[in-house]
Amino acid sequence: MRTALRLLPAGLIAVIALAGPLLAPSPIDAPVAAPYALPGPGVPLGADELGRNVLSRVLAGGRELLLTSLVVACLVTVAAALLGTAAALRPALGRIVERVADVMILLPAVLAVLLVVLSWQGGGRVALVTAAVAVGLPYAIRVVCAAAAPIAGSGYVEAAVAGGERLPQLVWREVLPNLRATLLILLGLRFVAAVYVVTTAAFLELGPQPPAADWALMVRENAPGILLNPWAVVVPSLAIGVLALSVQTAAEVLAPRSGRQVVARL
Amino acid sequence: GSGPRRAAAGDGPATGPPRRGGTLRVGAVGKASAVNRDPHGVQVNDSDYLILALAHDPLTVPGHRPNVVPRLAARWESDDLRRWRFTLAEGATFHDGTPVTGADVAWSLRRLRATPAGATRLPGIDAGGIKADGRNAVILTSDYPNSEVPLLARLTTFTLKEDTTDVTRAPGTGPFRLESFRDGNARLVRNDAWYGGEPPLDAIEVRMFESPQAMTSALLTGQIDLASNVGPVAARTAEGRDGVQVIRRPHDMAMPIVMRTADGPFADERVRLALRLAVDREAMVRQVLSGYGTVANDVLGTADPAYATGLTQRARDLARAGRLLDEAGFDRRGTYELFTTEDVPGLAESATLFATQMRDAGVNVKVVKQESAVFWDRTWLKAPLYTTYWGTNDSVVFFAGKTMQSGTAHNEAAWKDEEFDRAYRKAVGATRGTGRATALRELQRVEYESSGYLLWGMADGIDLAAAGVGGLPKLPGYGRVQLERSWLSA
Amino acid sequence: MAERLTAARGPAAPPAWRAGQSSASGPSASGPSASGPSASGPSASGPSASGPSPSGFSASRPLSLLLRGAAALAQRAVLLAVLLVAVFAAMEFLPGDAARSSLDRGASAAAVAARRVELGLDQPLWNRLLRWMAGLPTGDLGVTSRGEQVAEVIGRHFPGTLLLGGLAFAVTMVAALALAVVAALRPSSALDRAISGTSTVVAALPEFVVASVLVLLFALWADLLPAVTVTAAGGGPASAAMLVLPVLSLAVPQIGWNARVARAALADECTAPHVEAAVLDGLPPRRVLLRHVLPGSLPTIAAGAATSVGMLLGGAVVVETIFNYPGVGSVLAGAVRDRDTPLVAGVVMVTSVAILAVLLAADLVRGWASVRRP
Amino acid sequence: MTPAVARIDELVLTGPAGGVVVDVPAVSGERGAVVALVGPSGAGKSTALRSMLGVLPDGLTCRAGRVRVLEHEVLGLDPVRLRRLRRHHIALVDQDPASRLNPRMRVRHLLAELAARPGPGELRRLLTDVCLPADDEMLARRPHQLSGGQQRRLALARALARRPDLLLLDEPTAGLDPSLGAEIGLLVRELADRHDMAVILASHDGDLVGRIADRVIELRIPSRAPVPSPPPVAVPSASAVPLPAPAPPTIMAPPPPVAAAVPPPAPAPTPAGGAASRAGRPVRAAARRTPALIMRRLRARTGRRGRTILHDVELELGAGAAHAVIGPSGAGKTTLARAITGLHPHAEGVVELDGQPLPLRLARRTGEQRRLIQLVPQDPLGALNPVRTVGAVLARPMRLHRRVDPADVPSRVERLLADVALPAETVTRLPHELSGGQRQRVALARALAADPAVLVCDEVTSALDAPTAQALMELLMRLREERGLAVVLVSHDLDLVARHCDTACSIDRGRISWAGRAGAVLQRG
Ligand SMILES: Nc1ncnc2c1ncn2[C@@H]1O[C@H](COP(=O)(O)OP(=O)(O)OP(=O)(O)O)[C@@H](O)[C@H]1O
Ligand SMILES: Nc1ncnc2c1ncn2[C@@H]1O[C@H](COP(=O)(O)OP(=O)(O)OP(=O)(O)O)[C@@H](O)[C@H]1O
Ligand SMILES: [Mg+2]
Ligand SMILES: [Mg+2]
Ligand code: NI
């Protein structure tokens, strides 16, 4: 019951994101008011750069973003969790993984996204997802690696090694379950970061193309008019934030509770 | 529609006689990575051009009517439209006091001609065709009769001393003298000895801004006095604020849609006409430009005194557009990509709205936004449907020669039309008079009927200024840099 | 109660707690002697009771540290080289080239070709790369497509970014740690939830939204702070107040991100038995947090911080543009747009060095905090 | 009589299912008195001690609980006062000190942060009190650079550092050799006598309890949770060892304060001779074959260029044989055990298993080689993954090494639990929900689940009461007989060693100082 309650906001935002296009009061690409008109009758959130209904576009703009970013976030988190812990367990492998990751951290995101998406002509969403994963992975690996290092040195991992466990089992059974909090946060943050990359791609004219409504794209397109109609920027931004928040809560609620809790209040 | 209200009533331009003195802080857009201080180089940055234009003089400058007025060249004449003689202004000197000679001008023009884009800047004029004529004149010889040579001498015909090596520190001839320069920001002080008469301002400080938004914020918080070319969104933001004037310079920018005529889905003249009839020009101006613009009629060069006002203004006629498409056998099931880029504000938006409007005519247009470098490399001059823009509103003939006559390298729509070419040749080859007027009318009629351009409107140039600034330029395009008569009230 | 204790065992109490017992041998043949040698040095020599121990691990320490440092540096240099090769290749991949973008759009094909030759773009990639790299040791980073010395361009712009990024980084770390610690002190309280929620949402806000809102609030409405940066004659911002908004815009999303990471790392570490022990020992919460929880979660926090540096420098591109801040971020954006490979590579190189330094620091923190078994 | 510093009037905890898990009888401790809690493993000794700090195991519900410490009702005391109480007046030395010492802090800081007057002199005094060398090198070490016994003593020193009014000791002598245990006993007695502390300790070390306790309180496992008796083992005499009959809480008469003068009560009825004769058979059986495990010139260092902590140790062990390793704390027993298992990274020498040379680095050993030698580590809490249930922990080696038909795994797990005398419901527990002795047995069961050829036990009975320890030994005996399991038993419990092992060696400062028949260890003193 309490679980259901905590999941409610996440469910709600997911429903809005997925079914939003059906709820939109007016078509997403037809101008209905002056550009950047302030909220008024018929346009509760005002109008965007072309005078289109911000509410309609907000309702319509979550689906693609939600799905793309979710896929990216999950891929990055899972891959980083596996690679990062493996790296922590096997110093030799770890050095290679970390050095590769380091190189990629140094590469500015803009350049990385450009490279992947432009060299993969016609890759579309897949190319974007690939780029986002490539950009996000090194960061995530570093965090996981750092978090896993103390556990890799713990007595129970040693015992498992002595018991004959191989790397995959060590990763999967011994280390990962102990990184629950860090991994869940990572998932949420990777989601946010994925949104970021999608926005960056939009910045490079590589992401969703107009007139598609997309929260990330809206934030960017309407930025010049933020002083005229702040809602056109703030609402999609908040939608992204709330979405990230609910992804996070959902992950926390749904993931199995295990392990000892914080034993005593500090 | 909801047209823009006029500039805030209480804060009109400063009135009264020009006052001498004061330092004007001007903002201009520019990228730190693209700063270029060579007067004959490629000026991507507004800020660089502004600085150069204040410190150096071109031979001629844009005007209202006529659209070419004297500057360093006091007058010009030609008998055959091939051999043009430009006489320099009386008393023109460099900032170091030495007089400007015909040799200096000729050397500078040859230097300009030798740059990679020289051939398009001075079309038809070879280095050999540039000669000093006495102490204070220069002669330009064109390969063909060209009445537009004075017009070509606008903008970048900056004069340096003969055999200058360090162009960034070379003295100019302009109304202001460069005092300091750093990273695109400059301070210029009055040139008391300027041949055009002493400018009222003591000094001008040019500040480079990465984006129009930053520039607008700076103006609104009083960090600068003049923000040049900020765009309609900034204008609306500034409207109604105390102490800010909004200056509109009509016919500043053309953002036509190019339909490829040589081949592809738009090769049929009827299809092109259909699209021109399907677009809702009023809505485009209202939504894309926030009303800061005027409806146009598919002919480029709207600010030209010779612009054909006689042609009927096209308006939306979906029924006729549909009929035309049917006649042409246009495939309405196909999806047509409209390429665009975000180089200038409003360009991508115009494409988006255009695509929406085309749906009403049953044409599926899909907007593809491209990064600037990709756009210019892959799309421009090649794609069947794309947006383009021309920032300086030059003359009808200029556009015809540069982008439409069959021989030009920059024929954006790959348009070839015998009739048009003939009219063009007649127009450039004709001296002022009725022959030229008829040719120009003919040229614009053909362009109106069958060129590859869909010009739905013209964007206003918009500057913001603090209330106390007077004498600001009103001309479109690069006319905005003429700050030598501006002044500050106390 | 403590007072009473102190009184009872005041200076009057015998100084040695186990008075008289330490010398008693009694039945304990192995008492002190059993533990004595275990502490003595490399001794095969016998039961030397105590004294300084010239054991291996303390003697060669400085030298091995130095060697390790050198090795780490060399490794980083190789990384950097790999990256630069990647950047060169990446730029090659992109459509368009510097020749075209440094010319008017009207330039003819012949002019473009001539310009390509002039910029050396007609040379194969490897040639250009090697030539560029050969100049590195002398500090020659090549020439931009507009003919300026890359090193000069960067020299003019990088200090600004370093200042901006450094300040933002400092603000980020202080704020994020403070928030995480405050939240961790009261786990699953309303405050904890509020901090976690806000930081997630804030982390999702793009810099330019934060920047625009800040400008709106503090510059346009309240008129407290300058909206944009005006460059002083020296090249830096004209006043310190001009730094406030850019630093905040950069830091706010990163604070959100780091607060989350730090909070999670603290939560994971809080489950460790030794933390429980510290709590049961009655140590003050702050001490438990700082001495027992934080060191264990420091590697994760440091990793988060290290990744933040990359994002801060990335965010600088946007923030510098919005605030017109004179920095290298806007140069990079323009250079990518113009396909100006030497400039891009140069900027990437200096930012990489900055990032690498922080990554190295993060690695050191991890090495320090990791517990290696004997 | 002085008023009680601490008293538990009642403490009844119930499990999730509602059954009573812990039922602590009345306990009280006064200044100057040493009170001992005894009872079988899992009876609630540790729980009782921890309750005096105001903590109850999470997952259990408190049905009735009244615990007063220094005029404070500690259960539900407000956090600030509770903290102050813990900081200044109560100190607990936990049962598994290894995991409870911050691995990133040096001895110096571990002591100083709790010391009432943290000066260098005080720190040294503390170390001397617990028989640790009081030199700078020791102060600069981190917990993982200490042996198990040293860690325990460090934890004790930490507790003493704040000079508490109430000292709670959970198995203070577990893992310490007898003489050191006696030394610690003396220290505890003296703390009570001279410093007027109230000491409550939980211990299964009858010797210690007999010598120092003023009062003994026996806890028992609530009847709801009967401990399965170990299944009848093949050796007939083994079944004769009865499990302790639950006895009512007894308060014994306080023994005279000079504890050392009292002869230790004989803990087990079995005569030592019987054990020797039983142990005789496997030795003879093994002698015919090549020895299962051979070690030659085994050396170990603390680091690649570190100090040598094992010098040329030699060992030979036949299949089915049991070899004991004894020696003072910090001698190198654990290091030896770990080196055999391949866990000590800086070891050199020769190890052979069944005539095959065995790499000394674990990474070079094959899965099968790893299975064949299993270690039960000294710190069971640290060696059990905090998020995996007992059931999962035990089932894993069976599945991993495919020694058991997958369908049979659950039943085998159940059998294994019964073997080590743990109730079947333990399968769903997590490590921190177990008592110290239960954890130790889980760790043993895990090692056995792999069906090894050589079992290396590092202090496996240190947290167990004598009958349970006895039962475990019987189990090992049975396995030695049935499967030819060879056992290396690191222990300080000389009785146990004498009764259950064939041969023994003593390690001192990293060298074998003595080797011979196990029966002889008692005579050696
Ligand atoms: N990394 C290390 N650095 C320094 N000394 C170490 C290190 N590891 C172990 N030692 C020392 O090596 C000695 C042997 O340790 P070991 O754990 O083998 O002792 P033990 O015989 O098992 O003692 P106990 O009975 O107390 O468990 C101890 O004196 C210990 O302090
Ligand atoms: N969180 C928990 N959930 C369920 N049962 C628990 C929990 N914590 C402890 N127990 C159970 O409570 C009982 C008492 O545990 P406690 O640790 O007090 O035993 P003990 O007397 O110290 O035993 P030992 O001598 O083995 O250390 C055990 O049966 C244990 O399994
Ligand atoms: Mg216990
Ligand atoms: Mg040991
Ligand atoms: Ni007190």
Image: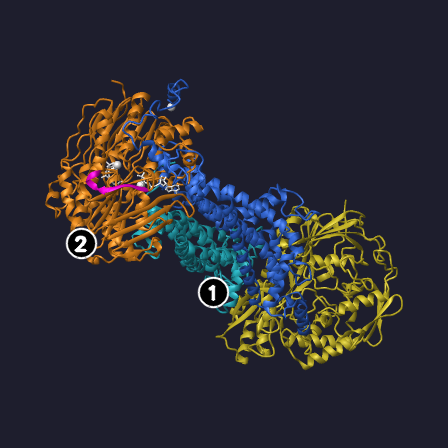
Chain colours: A cyan, B yellow, C blue, D orange
Left or right side of B301 for C52: left
Q: In which quarter of the image is ligand 2?
A: top left
Residue C67 on image: x %, y %: 51, 49
Q: Name the residue under label 2.
A: D288
Does residue A19 sit above or below B132 in this rendering?
above
What is the total number of numbered labels drawn onto the structure image? 2
Amino acid type assigned to the residue bearing label 1 in the image: Ala
Left or right side of B458 for C270: left
Estimate how packed mark 2 is, as few (under 14), some (14 to 19) or many (20 or more) residues with alpha carbons within 10 Å: few
Amino acid type assigned to the residue bearing label 2 in the image: Arg
Q: Name the residue under label 1.
A: A127
Q: Quadrant of the N terminus of chain C?
A: top left
Quarter holding residue D113? top left
Residue stretch in magenta = D511-520
C-alpha gap between disc 1 and disc 2: 69 Å
Residue at the extreme bottom: B418
Left or right side of D136 for D316: left
Indicate whether residue D513 is drawn in magenta: yes
Q: Is the magenta stretch mostly helix, strand or loop?
A: strand
SS at badge 2: helix
Q: Nearer the viewer, residue C335 or D158?
A: D158
Q: In which quarter of the image is the C terminus of chain C?
A: top left
Q: Is residue D164 visible?
A: yes
**Residue at 18% across, 36% down:** D222
Estimate how packed mark 1 is, as few (under 14), some (14 to 19) or many (20 or more) residues with alpha carbons within 10 Å: many
Residue A196 on image: x %, y %: 49, 55
Which chain letter matches label 2? D
Residue C239 on image: x %, y %: 66, 43
